[in-house]
Amino acid sequence: MKAGGQARNSTAGNETRSSFSSRLGYVLAVAGSAVGLGNIWRFPYLAAKYGGGIFLLVYLILMLTFGYALIMSETALGRMTRRSPVGAFQAFGKSWHFRLGGWVNAIIPMLIVPYYCVIGGWVTKYLFEYLRGSTIMLADDNYFHGFIAESFGAEFWFLLFSVAVVLVLLAGVKHGVERVSKVMMPLLVILAIFVAGYAMTRPGALEGVKYFLIPNFANFSWMTVVAAMGQMFFSLSIAMGILYTYGSYMKKDVDIEKSTFQVEAFDTGIAMLAGLMVIPAVFAFSGGDPDALKAGPSLMFITIPKVFASMGFGTGAGLMFFLLVFMAALTSAISLAESGVSTFEDQLGWSRKACTLLMGAIIIILGSASALGFGVLDFVAPLGMSLLDFFDFLTNSLMMPVAALSTCLLVTRVVGLKKITEEVELSSRFKQKQIYAFMIKYLAPIFIIIILLSSMASVLGWISM
Ligand code: TRP
């Protein structure tokens, strides 16, 4: 009872749980948490690396089946219990299974936000360089690797970004930042359409458009599925407890199913736009070189500056682009950190300030490891990966499948489909009820287990990444 009771006056930090005022308000808030570096930075590099069109196809299928079922479940459970994940799980039982299920969900954002802030730091550095007009320098092939290998710089920009995140939380001006970012989001979409249009019309870029949009089964591997699934979790902010929390603020008359589709459509639209910005540019500026396609986390930072360097007003466009990405990254990092802070508040019962400082310490320790992992710490290579890739793999490919599985089990074994249906039908008819039931009962758990086994097999080196 105790943990649940504390969780009640949780995340909002006040006694009564506030709610989103309308469905639009809800969709905007969730879409705001969904759109971030995942769409602009992570999606294009994974799509480039894991097969282009075939990755996109697998991603779309997973999102419409799996992603849909999980978003529905997490939101409904959050709204039903009015609690964040640790509390929501314990609302149904007290044994260690429930504790574990809640905690796996709750810990994931705490492990993501440190490396998210490292990427945020890179974005800040690029923003600064565009301000100084270093457009040509940034477009150099070796610039980015030089920057991250030179540890002091990467650490400095990471710290700057992280301190901004912690200060916003301490000062309680989070909503102000979100409001600014909501205004900037549409601008980001417009600029991205423009840049994608420009990139796609460069000589040679059409090959990239084809590579990204047309599935080629020759490029398929198991890792395509593992990566697509991890990306779906990351981008839609599922399997990390976030949607329990959002659901807990949702009013009973909001149509859960409709808002789920809207969020998915919006999030995927932006990811595809980013793909069309980055991948054709790899073909236009690096001739579709397989090594360039496999660049991984650095891809955006290497190709996008080339696009800007080649166009008129490139410095202005680059400045604008990195400013908008910076805002998207900042708001996402704030929400991720906030979710950690509220878990600490609920579970440790400390003051908000102490919990924020604890989260800040975690960000700085784990984030510094990731930031320095390309420089002075590059000899630390768990599973042969850089530290940043390692944290990314640990959360997206190992922990999130476990978190998703615990939600499936909670729904099917404990809560029961009947209660979920009742919750969804409080506001509207549950149109995809049969499909939902099939997903959550059979397809999702079986699939998650296969994914988990393949991730482990790749860790052990049985299948290649
Ligand atoms: N979905 C976000 C992105 O694509 C990242 C993210 C994951 C997130 N979980 C979150 C953002 C929770 C805010 C809150 O970048």
Image (tube, rainbow, N blue to C red):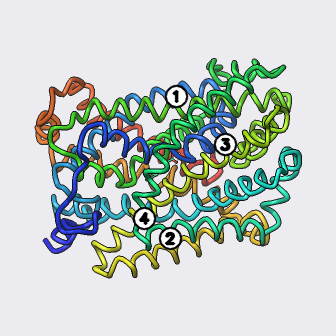
Give the x, y percent position of residue 238.
40, 46
* Rendered position, 120 above or below 379: above
Where residue 426 sits, quadrant-wise, is top left
Which residue is labeled 4 in the image?
173
Which residue is labeled 3 in the image?
321
| Front: mark 1 or 3 | 3
Which residue is labeled 2 in the image?
166
Lateral position of residue 446 relative to residue 7, left or right? right
Residue 410 in sight:
no
Which residue is labeled 1 in the image?
58
The first of marks 1 and 4 along the sequence is 1
Inspect the image, locate mark 3, and give the three-letter code of the amino acid beneath it.
Phe
Q: Which residue occupies the foreground of this view, 341 or 378?
A: 341
Residue depicted at 13% across the width and 71% down the height = 1
* Rendered position, 36 above or below 355: above
**Helix, strand or loop for disc 4:** loop
